[in-house]
Image (cartoon, rainbow, N blue to C red):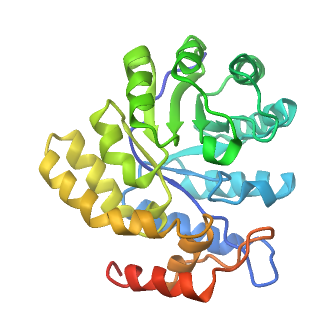
Amino acid sequence: MGKKIEFCGCYVAIVTPFNSDGSLNEEGLRSNIEFLIANGVAGIVPCGTTGESATLTWEEHKRVVDIAIEQAKGRVQVIAGAGSNNTSEAVEAALHAKKSGADAIMSITPYYNKPTQEGLYRHFSAIAAKVDIPMVVYNVPGRTAVNMLPETVARLCDIPQVMAVKEASGNITQISEIHRLCGDRLDILSGDDGMTLPVLACGGKGVISVIGNIVPAKMSKMVALYQKGDHHAALEIHEELLPLSQIVFIETNPAPVKVCMAEIGLASGPVRLPLAPMSDTNKEKLLSVWKTYK
């Protein structure tokens, strides 16, 4: 296994911008990445849930990863999405990420299949056995119908490639238990913007953020302040951003954050079916909150 890397700070789960005809907006993607880097993020995560990975073709998926790596030019970490409910497909995505020069991969727990805890362990073990690249395992039961338990995460710690977990269970007790079992063997990243500060207090190192697409400097500053020991100032930013963290999930991610991005001139475009444009009522609620941050 190559050198262990640290996952620390504000990472952004970047959206995949589309043109009005639904095609990939490559220049817009590059421009968005420059915006994030200029605002101090620690890294970018292409082809995650926020990037609508479920409706990208594998050709598009690989292209988005390649653009992210090319544009970052080593200035920030690139954690390439490499998840699937088909283990062999996840391996293929991981192999492409490694070949293209990604710093790490993020791999979600398999969705729809509803594997047992043993199945989850074997899934990630199989990826690690085929691809020597740092791995962030991603637990988001609200999307996958399966919750990866702390004991399973602790087993995965023994795999050298597994260096971090993105935890989006919404269960702070579970996240605290992961840290109790794994300690410094594993970096914990919040998968929920609104829970970032509590996760940091329970031993977390940062966040893979959705609202980081639109307030990257604020999210980065909050994590940095906490890590420097200025917990009061970090709490102030947490509470300032909490209404935004909640309203961007008024409909299925990433439809709301794409609307906010368009309002400040970032490339976003439509969402792909089966996601639909926001309802007028919810869009009005979203923008009434977002206007206070612009």
- Is residue 278 visible to the viewer in this orientation of the structure? yes
Tell me where residue 209 appears, x and y as whole percent.
47, 54
Residue that appears at 59% across and 59% down: 71
- Most foreground residue, 34 or 194: 194
- Most foreground residue, 203 or 92: 203
Please identify the quarter of the rendering in which residue 291 is found.
bottom left
Residue that appears at 49% across and 68% down: 248
* Above or below, 12 relative to 147: below
* Quadrant including the C terminus: bottom left
* Above or below, 192 relative to 242: above
Q: Is residue 57 left or right of residue 291?
A: right
Tell me where residue 259 appears, x and y as whole percent.
56, 79
- Is residue 6 visible to the viewer in this orientation of the structure? no
- Most foreground residue, 102 or 185: 185
Q: Is residue 86 left or right of residue 282?
A: right
- Labels in figure, total: 0
Please identify the quarter of the rendering in which residue 99 is found.
top right
Please identify the quarter of the rendering in which residue 94 is found.
top right
Tell me where residue 90 appears, x and y as whole percent.
79, 35
Tell me where residue 77 appears, x and y as whole percent.
51, 44
* Quadrant including the N terminus: top right
Residue that appears at 60% across and 63% down: 253
Q: Is residue 290 left or right of residue 64?
A: left
Residue that appears at 26% across and 66% down: 240
